Amino acid sequence: MKLLQRSLVARIIGSLLAISAMALVSIAVTAWIAGSSRGDAAAINLAGSLRMNTYQVVAALQRYDRAPSAERRDRVETLAERFAERLDSPDLTGALPGAEGHRLLTQYHRLEARWAGELAPRVVEAVAGGDAAIPPLTRELEGLVDEIDRLVSLLEQNSEAKIQLLGALQILFLALTVVVVAIALYDIRYNLVRPLHQLVVQAREAGRRNFGYRTRLSGSDELALLGRTLDTMATELGASYAELEARVSHKQRQLARSNEAMQILHDGSRALYGGGNDLCASAAPMLRRLEDLLGIGPMGLALHDPYDQREVPILATHSRSRPTYCRDHDCHACLLDPEPLSLAENDEAECLLLPVSVGDTLLGTLEVWYPRDTGLDDSTRRLLYTLTDQLATAVYLQRRIEEEQQVTLMNERTIIARELHDSLAQSLSYLKMQVARLERMQAKELPRETQAPVFDELRTGLDSAYRQLRELLTTFRLRLDGPGLQSALRQTTLEFSERLGFPVELFFDVPPHLLNPNEEIHVLQVVREALANVHKHARAHWAAVTVRFAEARLEVMVEDDGIGLEDDTSPPMHYGLVIMRDRADTLGGDFQVRNRQAGGTLVSVGFTPQTARLITQQPA
């Protein structure tokens, strides 16, 4: 019984087994009753023939009584024996019930006893010539017919009783089957169909992400257990789905905040890299926007001094006062907030110190204060690390720019000093020696005719020094005013075109930013010196300047169609040619002066620029 209460499958199987058992029992009972009724019809027919047989005996006795004869006597005896045989026939006795006291069995014994004990001996005695009278015997035999009729009726009633019993049993088993089927259908409807419908509805609602539906099935069978399990699962899924939705919403807020923070960092990077040296004014707005977005602050930036190993505060958001080492008192980036924060002064905030570094080089530290109760999540920490990387890049680039400016300034000063030493200083030294010579002549009171050559040398030297000074001023003015070597060469060719009286052609094919300032000055001076020689000595009508970069070398050529050189092998090494050769040696290149095949002179300088030389030295 407990199994039937706990298992719907067991109840359904039990119902099917009960229906099958009743069907089998009904079939077995029907077969048994049909088997027991198999000889009833033959017994009834045989009992009915006894009645006819009795009439035949009566008729034979009456014929014998009217006219006795041996033949008629034999006929009576034959009919009497036939009656006895039929009364004792197995067809008749087999249909009798086996229960003692049954009416049918009692009636058969009464009929058998009356025939065998009373009538059969009297029939034999009557035809044997005894004292028995035939008329009374015939009347008794006719009374025996009533006994036979009663036996036939009882046989018919016995057969009908069996048929009625079979019908009653069929009705009983049909009723039991209907009851079992009704119970099974009721159990299936209320314990199978309805729970299945509730389970289907719950599955459909779960598919629609509605985890609030509950089956609330009671009982201890399989579907009730499944329903309670699905209810628990739906509760857990609802909680998990709500948690996932909350996490997704939180992640979406974090992504939106991260995107906004990245936009702030992008805008801040443009301000950092385009704001010159004012790191405070360019970084403070970005830091304040990040503080408002991330719910942190204040923040402070200190740069690391590599010389005395100390941290120098240069920026602090929400500050009450300027940093100690503020360089611009006209800047108010740190003092824009009317109500400075004071989280660092109580126990409700914690500080995160982040290094601002490039590689292993520490450039400074970023101090970030944040509320202790909320803390810093991973996305905020990643954004702060990105901020420190950006600040480190900006500080590093600012320092590199300052260093490059210092190096460029020192290179410019070195170039100017060298140009003055190679040209004007040597001329002044020569003039100083001529002055000393003139002083000795005057001390010796030599005649004026002897001193005249010295005065001529002084005059020539002063003219040369003045000319060199003007060329240097022109060169540096061109260098400072123009946007590069090409502009300076264009101005130089225009200048000498006016001096020569014909246009000087310029062919320039050099990639930008190839030469450093020192190389540009040497190239410009070589071109100017070569054009000056064309103006002084060539008597030319055409001149061209070619500057091109090919096969990792810079070729500088100045050509004219003048009178040319007397000898290509040994051109006159006057002062200008010596300076051009020295400049070529300084650049690590080659210097040539020769006659052109078409007439005139060709001055060429070829060298490998420093940047190109560094590229060619890299491993393949």
Image (tube, rainbow, N blue to C red):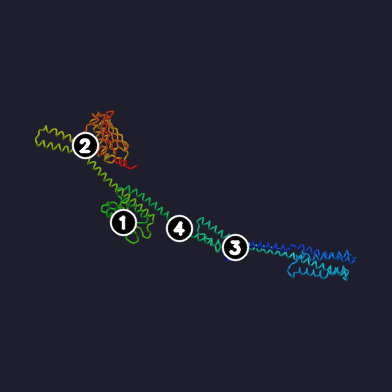
- For residue 243, the mark is 4
563 or 501, which is in the foreground?
Answer: 563
- Tell me the element at label 4: helix
Q: CA distance from mark 2 to mark 1?
A: 59 Å
- For residue 11, the mark is 3
Instruction: Count residues near mark 4 (Cα–Cα under 10 Å), then give few for <14, some for 14-19, many for 20+.
Output: few
- For residue 36, the mark is none
Q: Residue 280, how many percent across, how many down?
A: 31, 51
Does label 4 or label 1 sit earlier along the sequence?
Answer: 4
- Tell me the element at label 1: loop
Looking at numbered disc 2 in the image, what kind of residue is underneath it?
Gln
399 or 612, which is in the foreground?
Answer: 612
Residue 109 sits in quarter: bottom right
Q: CA distance from mark 1 to mark 3?
A: 82 Å
- For residue 319, the mark is 1
Q: Residue 607, how many percent across, how many down?
A: 28, 37
Contact between marks 2 and 4 (CB within 8 A): the answer is no
Q: CA distance from mark 4 to mark 3?
A: 42 Å
